[in-house]
Image: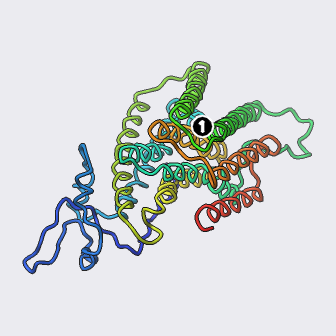
Amino acid sequence: MHGLATIAGRKNGLGFVGLLPARHHSRNGCADGRGINPLLRASATLLFTPRPFVAQRGGVHLLPPLLDSFALNDPLAYLAIFVGVSLLMLWRLESMLDNGLEGTALGTLLLPYCSGLGNLIFVWLMVGRRGAENDILTNCLVNNVTNLTLLLGVPALIWGLQVMPNQAPAGSRGKKPAKAGKAAGTEQKINQLSLLLTLAAVLFFTGAVWLLGRDGKLNGTEGLMLIGLFFFWQCVQVFDVLKHNVRAKVSFGWRFYLDGLVVLACAYLMYETIDWLVTWLTHQKGGFISRDNLGWLSGWLMVLPNAILALYWGWRRRADVVYASQVGDGHICIPLCLGIFALVKPLPMSGFTNQALALLLGSAVVHAAFLTIAGGLPRWAGAGLCLAYGWFVYAGLLA
């Protein structure tokens, strides 16, 4: 993948201390834990003790011992690895695009699982640790609202998101269009219809969550219904891709499956990094970067790959992939993630949750209207979506 930018993490005022397997003492009796940044050893005793964390980690974990041997067991290192493996995953997915998958099919079928994989891992971790249901709900809402407002609004504001071509100039009227131009117009029209169908799914999924939660919660039965709704939608997408490949006489070569193995390896590393970061965050007890804001912070962490994806494809003027990837990613959180957690513990649905769902429904309607009428999202509409996201953060976090 060309032109991808890297994202640097930011330190917080609590300091960066790794989660160590043990504490060692030097000759003068001072704590000297391996993996601690040397600049922070003086204040290491003020931070949490890592031993309970190590006891909670089951199974085989390859990444923490490796980073610990290089004294890199701190949040910045894990954040950099999370972003790096996400970029590698997206790069190999672009290769899969060249080996049997069209642009919009890539967005609706594969990219949501990869860009939304972090949310699925987060739900899995919170289920295993009996986490708070509000953190899951906030994580999913932050992810989806950010996708439909900020991450579509910013590329539209910078480059414009034009899925359908503009009208032909007046001087060219009456001329017979070239065959290549007609074929390109047909492909763009198909992409437009596919995106409208994906937005319709957002309306159905979000509306279903709102209707099922009108009694104030989502229980296990309702969660199972949401999961079934999601997999029915995925079956439709799978058969759509298979029909396209039959018509185009496309088959998946060996490189396609090799890239699939690389994606699976990236998924494992994502699990390792998210596991470490979530556990580290739950031990922070004061300030903004703390366990009190776990839902918001984890939601923003999960959309980092989406942000890079949106900026990259926006820069390449592929509005169809920008739209499909961001809208399709929301299907992982709502309804799949909410449905999975509701099987274990009821999810409360009241207050700010209903306002966020209303914002999601309104954003989906706005995108569908502009795609139908204007063929894309103009710059001024992108600015409006960014302002809507600002209200969402203020009302949910600062008010």
Q: Is 215 placed above or below 227 here?
A: below
- Residue 151 point in image, percent of width and height: 62, 54
- Residue 323 point in image, percent of width and height: 65, 45
- Residue 9 point in image, percent of width and height: 43, 65
Q: Is 16 placed above or below 326 here?
A: below
- Residue 325 point in image, percent of width and height: 59, 43
Q: In which quadrant will I find the C terminus?
A: bottom right
Residue at left 91%, top 46%? 170
- Residue 184 lies left or right of residue 274; in this view the side is right
Residue at left 76%, top 43%? 371
- Among the 4 quarters of the image, the one containing residue 159: bottom right
- Three-letter amino acid code at disc 1? Gly
Local secondary structure at mark 1: helix
Residue farthest to the left?
Answer: 27
Residue, disc 1: 103
- Residue 217 lies left or right of residue 320; in this view the side is left
Q: Is disc 1 surrounded by few (<14), some (14 to 19) or many (20+) residues within 10 Å?
A: some
- Among the 4 quarters of the image, the one containing residue 76: bottom left
Q: Is 170 placed above or below 174 here?
A: below
Q: How is the image coloured?
A: rainbow
- Tell me if residue 15 can be seen: yes
- Tell me if residue 94 can be seen: no
Residue at left 58%, top 50%? 141
Residue farthest to the front?
Answer: 215
Residue at left 25%, top 45%? 58
Which one is in front, 129 or 325?
A: 129
How many numbered marks appear?
1
Which one is in front, 142 or 318?
A: 142
Q: Is 180 placed above or below 365 here?
A: above
